[in-house]
Image (cartoon, helix red, strand yellow):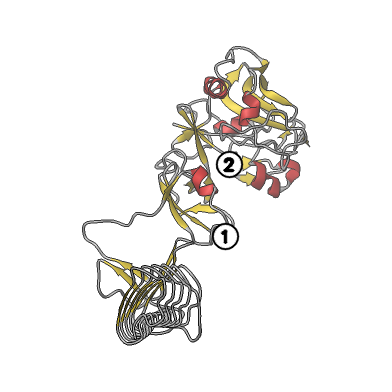
Amino acid sequence: SALHSNSTGYFNTANGFMTLYTNTTGNNNTAFGAASLNFNTEGNNNTAIGVAANYYNEEGSNNTIIGHEAGMGTSAHNKSGNVFLGYQAGYNDTTDNKLYIENSDTLSPLIYGEFDNDILAVNGSLGVGTENPDESALLEVNSNSKGFLPPRLTNEQRDAITNPAEGLFIYNIEKKICEYFNGNNWEQTSYPPSHQMKCMQDFVDFRDGTIYKTVQIGTQCWMAENLNIGTMIYGTSNQTNNATIEKYCYNDDLTHCNTYGGRYQWDEMMQYTSWPRNGICPTGWHIPSDAEWCTLENYVDAGTVLCSATGWRGTDAGGNLKETGTTHWATPNTGATNSSGFTSLPGGYRYTNGSFSYLSSDAHFWSSSENGSDAWCRHLYYSNAQVDRNSYDQAYGFGVRCVQD
């Protein structure tokens, strides 16, 4: 009674009682085992091995079903593109393009897959290099000669991941360090000390536990955020040479320091000596000289800056150094692209009289280079894409960026 109703179907192979029994026009089917593919009428390219394998399939095609009652179902169905392996594997599944490897009719098989979504799941402990994975582990990798290799991504590739899950783990090939997603941001799995980090890695300043981002710009490695070390004092007082690093926060508000970094008088920043130039920077870093600032400007402004010039200079160095948008900068934040990754925020400054001004419109950064009783500074502005070079009274409170030794 195999192929009992076949009319125009061709290249079919049926072996077993009532195999392909109702097939009429289906082609290229192979059925071994009593009642396998019993209800098939028009389905093509199916392979069913085992008693009642894919029993109720009528028009489904391209199935590979191996096992007693595998893919059988409880009523007529037309599922296609499935691979079921094992006793009653996929018995109750009526959908397409699935993989089941299991010796029961469960909908949570030991191995489950979706061919159209490129999904493969293991419902149990998986051992790689071991036949006995620890019962407490979903995955155990065992080797004494090879390592575990996670996905290796650039910053751009990492940031292109859609809706990353909390705990998602990668290796960042730009930072040369592993990272995980904490539900809001990507974090490094560890933070090297300031003198051992590689540029582009975040590092921890062990003096206070603050974590800083870094960026490679040409041949220089810069901190990608303002220094924020020290104890806040009120703007009405001058910073003094004592055992404590002192800082100003805009309008004497610590939350501004957390966003924009501290503001420092030149002597406090330099720690009351002009050499060495590390000043209040972490170990392995120093206060940039006037010449080092010019190197940065020329790199981001295609060599258009004359280092000895004062005032607004270059073409778009300021825009290439400023954070984009108006979250921190006032409108219009002219020319801001942050193409350098320097990510300058504004933050204003402290006048010599102790008052604060221009929180959202100005960013001033000290250099370690003096000009008489003043010191050279760089100034970025919300409505200008250039960089201003001028010298200021050392009693002003400006921001500090450190550059790696």
Q: Residue at x 25, y 66 (%)?
A: 129
Residue at the disc numbered 2: 245
Q: Is residue 350 above or below residue 71?
A: above
Identify the amino acid type marked 1: Gly
Q: State the image quarter where residue 329 is shown.
A: top right
Name the spot of residue 251 as percent of width and height, x first.
76, 43
Tell whether 212 sits left or right of 170.
right
How many numbered discs, if any? Answer: 2
As rendered, which of 167 and 163 lies closer to the eye? 163
- Farthest residue toward the left? 145
Q: Quadrant of the C terminus?
A: top left
**Cα distance in 3D space between marks 2 and 1:** 34 Å
Name the spot of residue 266 as percent of width and height, x first.
62, 29
As rendered, which of 302 and 18 lies closer to the eye? 18
Name the spot of residue 348 as percent of width and height, x first.
72, 35
Q: State the image quarter where residue 219 is shown.
A: top left
Residue at the disc numbered 1: 183
Identify the secondary structure beneath mark 1. Answer: loop
Name the spot of residue 401 as percent of width and height, x first.
57, 34
Residue 65 is marked as none
The earlier-in-sequence mark between 2 and 1 is 1
Residue 320 visible, this angle: yes
Q: Quadrant of the N terminus?
A: bottom left
Identify the amino acid type marked 2: Ile
Q: Nearer the viewer, mark 2 or mark 1?
A: 1
Identify the secondary structure beneath mark 2. Answer: loop
Q: Bin the neighbour count of mark 1 within 10 Å (Cα to Cα): few under 14, some 14-19, many 20 and up.
A: few
Q: Is residue 322 above or below residue 389?
A: below
Q: State the image quarter where residue 106 is shown.
A: bottom left
Q: Is residue 171 above or below residue 277?
A: below
